[in-house]
Amino acid sequence: MTVRYPSPLRAGDRVGVTSPSSGVPEDVRERLDIAVRDVQDRGYEVVIGRCMDGAGHVSASAPDRASELMAMLTDPTVKAIVPPWGGETAIDLLPLLDWDRLRDAEPTWLVGFSDMATLITPLTLLTGTATIHGNNLMDTPYRVPEGLCSWLDIVTSAQGHRFTQTPPGRHRATGFDDFATSPGVRDHTLDSVGAWTRLDGKGAVEAEGRLIGGCIETLCNLAGTAYLDLSTFARNESPDGLLVYVEAAGDDAFTICRNLHGMRLAGFFDQANAVLVGRTGAPDNHSLSQHEAVMDALGSLDVPIIADIECGHVPPYMPIVNGASGRIVHTPGRSDLTQTLN
């Protein structure tokens, strides 16, 4: 198995929209419509699935969600799939997907973060298909800060394309925009200054490896299972090691610490040349901060650990391609992540 990159999207191609986890409540449907129009304005035909109901915590039954996702992933006319956002229990789809069929199908871009990591990361590990951990559909209307890119930029790229992203130096301190009252918001409120932070020591960092990772709260439940076997992936696709990234969505530092310990014990970080940690707004505890939680669990790895990267639930967003070759540089005068689709 080698990493497979979907064909670049061109004008007239179809983009599928489905909700493998949570659907869209009625009070934010206008935001969905705006986001869909933005994708259409790029020249794409948008196909919206049936699994979009936002009345509960999932958009439809697990069999229906799995069937719709499978149909889009194996439809040669659908070139990319993006959900409105994440959710809570996409894990129930994993045993219902036909992984053999997905390995045989032409690769399709699958985009998303948060609970979507439950699906995109196993898709890369089990089928070799590159996936994009980045802005969901409801985030798409936001203007992208200088130094970053959008999933819409990546899906137009051919195999072999190389791109570099740099931190903008500003982020949102707390909360998210209310799409019910401000459905057309296009500018992030970046009201706080911050840079990448090396947690394990001082000095410059330069590390390489294939990129793989996702949301701690969702992936920790897959650690030690066949759906999250990073060691086999590294042996087959990146024998010189991986760049593993993780990010905390909202759990407190004690919970994140326990989850990261469990992931380490299950071998999730065994092949890491460096660990990249997303900036988080999740709460500290009285005797343990989020940064301290990471070091408590992962400090024994003896690899560089760089935190406050824009790959989590704190806007803005730095898309990361699971399966791409990555090179991270962090020095007193430079911070960047270069990804190559090879």
Image: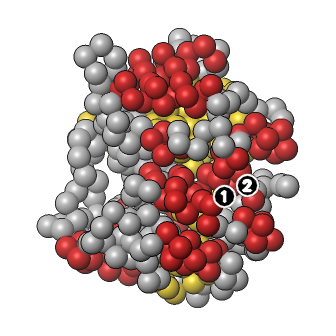
Q: Which residue is mark 2?
A: 126
Callout 2–callout 1 Cβ contact below 8 Å: yes
Please name whichever residue, 243 or 287, is drawn nearer the observer in this view of the structure: 287
Q: Which residue is mark 1?
A: 123
Q: Is residue 292 above or below residue 196?
A: above
Tell me the SS state at disc 1.
Answer: helix
Please name whichever residue, 319 or 125, is drawn nearer the observer in this view of the structure: 125
Q: Quadrant of residue 174?
A: top left
Please name whichever residue, 96 or 336, is drawn nearer the observer in this view of the structure: 96
Q: Quadrant of the N terminus?
A: bottom right
Q: Quadrant of residue 243?
A: top right
Q: Amino acid at mark 2?
A: Leu
Rounded to the nearest angstrom, the CA distance separating label 2 from label 1 is 5 Å
Residue 185 picture location, percent across and down: 24, 65
Query: Which residue does the image show at 65% across and 37% down from the upper left?
Result: 224
Tell me the SS state at disc 2.
Answer: helix
Alpha-carbon neighbours of circle 1 within 10 Å: few (<14), some, or many (≥20)?
A: many
Q: Is residue 61 above or below residue 300?
A: below
